[in-house]
Image (tube, helix red, strand yellow):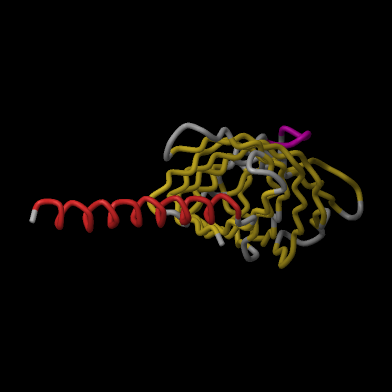
Amino acid sequence: MKNALIKPATLLLVAAAGLTATLDAQAQSTPWLVRVRAVYLDSANGGSTSPNLDLSINNKLIPELDISYFVTPEFSAELVLTYPQKQKVRSAGTEIGTLKHLPPTLTGQYHFNGLGPVTPYVGAGLNYTRFSSVSLPAGVTISKNSYGLAVQAGADFAIAPNMVVNLDLKKVQIRTDINLAGNKIGQLKVDPWLLGVGVGWRF
């Protein structure tokens, strides 16, 4: 009787181990990882080249979608997306208008594997920001395009073979010239910190 129970139990354990190994292998072999995050945009508000402007934008919570492709288990490329975000523009703390910005960012990442369910990573890349729907005092305009560097660090915490919880921190250069009657009078330096929390799926 004992042997009759041991044999099926052994077979069941072997099958379970095999299934777990298969799921782990599938999770590691699939090249795509998609994450959705809630991101807090904390603007550095570096001011402007003209101290009289004292420009800033508001901080806010924004949604984020990123798509990562793993070239190898360690190296990946990540494209970070959102929809145009509306921001209040202030001068010396007084609201003077609004604008929208769309800031897609592309980074290359290195993932530190082999640490169990936690996979830290670091990354660096480029940001492009498009400004639109600008509403500022008469005669004041801004440059529509911004190009800058981006750096990041974060970690994925595995909660299933194909699902992770993610923490991510990015620093991004976003800057635009301020013009009055066609002449540059300053520069708005947003340069935000972006702190994100979300979930991801490997497929």
Q: Is residue 187 above or below residue 201?
A: above
Q: Between 85 and 9, which is closer to the camera in this rendering?
A: 9
The quarter of the picture where the C terminus appears is bottom right
In the image, residue 13 lies in the stretch drawn in magenta: no
- At a point 43% along the width and 49% down the height, the residue shown is 165
Q: Position of residue 125 (x, y in %)?
A: 74, 41
The quarter of the picture where the N terminus appears is bottom left
In the rendered view, does 184 fall on the left or right side of 191?
right
Q: Number of labelled discs?
A: 0
In the rendered view, does 14 fall on the left or right side of 76?
left
Q: Say which quarter of the image contains residue 122.
A: top right
Q: Between 9 and 2, which is closer to the camera in this rendering?
A: 2
From this viewpoint, is residue 199 visible? no
Q: Main secondary structure of the magenta part?
A: loop
Highlighted magenta segment, given as a residue range: 47-51
Return the residue found at the far left: 1
Q: Between 132 and 51, which is closer to the camera in this rendering?
A: 132
- At a point 58% along the width and 60% down the height, the residue shown is 65
Q: Position of residue 150 (x, y in %)?
A: 70, 39
Q: Position of residue 164 (x, y in %)?
A: 45, 51
Q: Position of residue 182 (x, y in %)?
A: 91, 54
Return the residue found at the far right: 182
From this viewpoint, is residue 155 visible? yes
